[in-house]
């Protein structure tokens, strides 16, 4: 599986640690984030990752900033992206099962590296449950995008 990862300055160290971790587990990882600890802009990294997912350069994405919120908002601005912010594994599982989330977001200032690894493991190994009610609701989300002015 190909995984995209993106970050701002708040998450550079964690991004590199997770890239090593994911590579050690056999994932191909592509870096769409910033490689600096100097101040940089999470909307830029989030949008890059979102387009990589939509363009199928990668199968799923991981977005990290200080809280996970700013970069997830950026990702979710791109039609077709369903990004969810998680700090525990039940949510990381459920955003795949129920929401067919294509990007996992979390905060490098909120979760430690061990928790981040657990979130990533859970997200990447959980399939969409593909139930009728979930498909219906995801179609309704796409309808919202079509009504955008
Ligand atoms: C950067 O200081 C911080 O605002 C950013 O990483 C993120 O937490 C925003 O949502």
Image: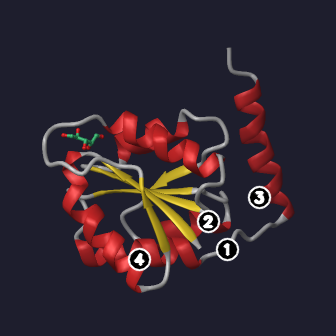
Task: Name the residue beneath numbered marker 4.
Answer: 22
Furthest-bottom residue in this view: 25
User: In which quadrant of the rendered image does the N terminus lie?
Assistant: bottom right
Quadrant observed for ligand 1 in the rendered image: top left
Of the two numbered discs 1 and 2 on the same chain, state the one appearing first in sequence.
2
- Residue 7 percent location from the top left of the image: 32, 50
Q: Is residue 116 visible?
A: no
User: Along the polypeptide, which appears first: circle 3 or circle 2?
Assistant: 2
Instruction: Give how far across and how far down residue 50 sits, in percent.
Output: 54, 44
Q: Which residue in the protein does label 1 denote?
A: 127
Quadrant in which the C terminus appears: top right
What residue sits 52% from the left and 71% below the top?
123
Query: Disc 4 versus disc 3: distance between alpha carbons?
Result: 29 Å
| Residue 99 seen in the current view | yes
Determine the CA span between mark 3 and mark 2.
11 Å
Q: Residues under labels 1 and 2: Cα distance? A: 6 Å
Which residue in the protein does label 3 denote? Answer: 134
Are the residues flagged by discs 4 and 3 in contact, CB closer than 8 Å?
Answer: no
Q: Secondary structure at mark 3?
A: helix
Give whichever of 56, 139 is nearer the camera.
56
Residue found farthest to the right:
132
Among the two numbered marks 1 and 3 on one chain, the one whose residue lies closer to the N terminus:
1
Residue at point 48%, 47% (across, down): 49
Residue 22 left/right relative to 13: right
Residue under label 2: 96
Q: Dot 4, how many residues are within 10 Å of its Cα: few (below 14), some (14-19), or many (20+)? A: some
């Amino acid at each position: 599986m190909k995984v995209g990862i993106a970050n701002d300055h708040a998450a550079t160290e964690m991004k590199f640690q997770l890239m090593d971790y994911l590579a050690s587990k056999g994932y191909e990882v592509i870096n769409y984030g910033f490689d600096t600890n100097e101040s940089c802009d999470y909307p830029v990294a989030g949008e890059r990752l979102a387009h990589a997912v939509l363009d199928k350069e990668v199968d799923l994405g991981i977005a990290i900033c200080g809280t996970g919120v700013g970069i997830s908002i950026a990702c979710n601005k791109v039609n077709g992206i369903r990004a969810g912010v998680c700090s525990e594994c039940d949510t990381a599982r459920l955003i795949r099962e129920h929401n067919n989330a294509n990007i996992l977001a979390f905060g490098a200032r909120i979760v430690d590296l061990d928790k981040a690894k657990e979130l990533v493991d859970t997200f990447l190994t959980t399939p969409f449950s593909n139930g009728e009610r979930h498909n219906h609701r995801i179609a309704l989300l796409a309808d919202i995008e079509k009504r955008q002015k």
